[in-house]
Amino acid sequence: MTDTTAAGSGRGRLAVHCRRITEDPSFGMGVFVVILINAGLMGAETYSGLAASQGRVLQLAEDGCLVLFTLEMVLRLGSYADRPKAFFRDPWNIFDLLIVASAFLPFLRSNTTVLRLLRLARVLRTARFLPHLRILLLAVGRSLPGTASFLFVGALVVYVYAMVGWVCFAHSDPQHYGSIGRAALTLFLLTTLDGLTDAVRAGLEISRFSIVYYASYALLASFVLVNVLIGVVLNSLDEAREMEEADARARERAARDMDAADEVRERIGAARLALDDLEASLDLARSAPPAAPGPREAKECERRLESAV
């Protein structure tokens, strides 16, 4: 029981020390600076002259960043020493662990293209230290289902108008409406309203009713659908902000509960140590000739129990 208690208390002390380091604001700022330096090194490698003349220096700097990232991950793992399963409940922890561990895999290090892509993925880790960026990424992810529906409706609108344009303008303007593909491409480019004036002028030379065709398409595709997309993104942004606030409150409650649990755990460990000492004293008393305990020994045992409780 003593070995188990000592191991548990050792993991607890390690977790407390590592957690004190990783939760310090200067630690997060330092990691953020290293990520930016790593991104700058990747950009410097794109200049062939600089890479040829300072290749050794750039490689040493990249290895130094990797060492710092590895040290960061070791500290984060150490902060969960008393509860290892909780580490994998955070998606950012899994993402960081995969990105850092991939740099040590032999078959990835030999593939320059894949290694550069993985190094580029480290830049995404800045979202961990920027709450607003994290909210935006979460909003983009939550808006994907609504965006998929928007793309389907937009494609349907473009297809219908492309068919109408092919029927009305195929013979007069085959360059833009000679096929369903050309008509769809023309209308897709008109979604940004760039070139709409020239298209309307060319359509008026064919028929005066072409203004209805172009005006309705511009109103529907460039205003209605775009505003629908903006509404979907803003709604997802509000949901992401609420989720981030809920996660922050949950982390605060978990931190308070963890502090209380650590205090109770320390008191239980102290009580176990006191009971082990009493058990050892009883074993020693049994092996020795029977003798009445003195007042000093009785007070010492009573003091140990009171301090443990």
Image (cartoon, grey):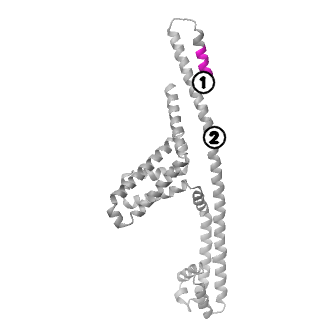
Q: In which quarter of the image is residue 293?
A: top right
Q: Is residue 304 within the magenta segment?
A: yes
Region rendered in magenta? 299-307
User: How many residues crowd around disc 1 within 10 Å: few (fewer than 14), some, or many (20 or more)?
Assistant: some
As drawn, is 83 to the left or to the right of 41?
right
Say whether disc 1 or disc 2 marks the residue closer to the N-terminus. 2
Residue shown at 37% from the left, 58% from the top: 58
Residue on which disc 2 sits: 256
Nearer to us in this view, 270 or 2? 270
The rendered magenta stretch, by its main secondary structure, is classed as helix
Q: Quadrant of residue 114?
A: bottom left
* Local SS, label 2: helix
Q: In which quarter of the image is residue 55?
A: bottom left
Q: Is residue 274 within the magenta segment?
A: no
User: How many residues crowd around disc 2 within 10 Å: few (fewer than 14), some, or many (20 or more)?
Assistant: few
Query: x%, y% of residue 233?
Result: 63, 65
As drawn, the label of residue 308 is: 1
Alpha carbons under labels 1 and 2: distance apart: 23 Å
* Local SS, label 1: helix
As drawn, is 240 to the left or to the right of 105?
right
Identify which amino acid the numbered label 2 is placed on: Arg
Residue shown at 44% from the left, 61% from the top: 40
Query: x%, y% of residue 189?
Result: 56, 80
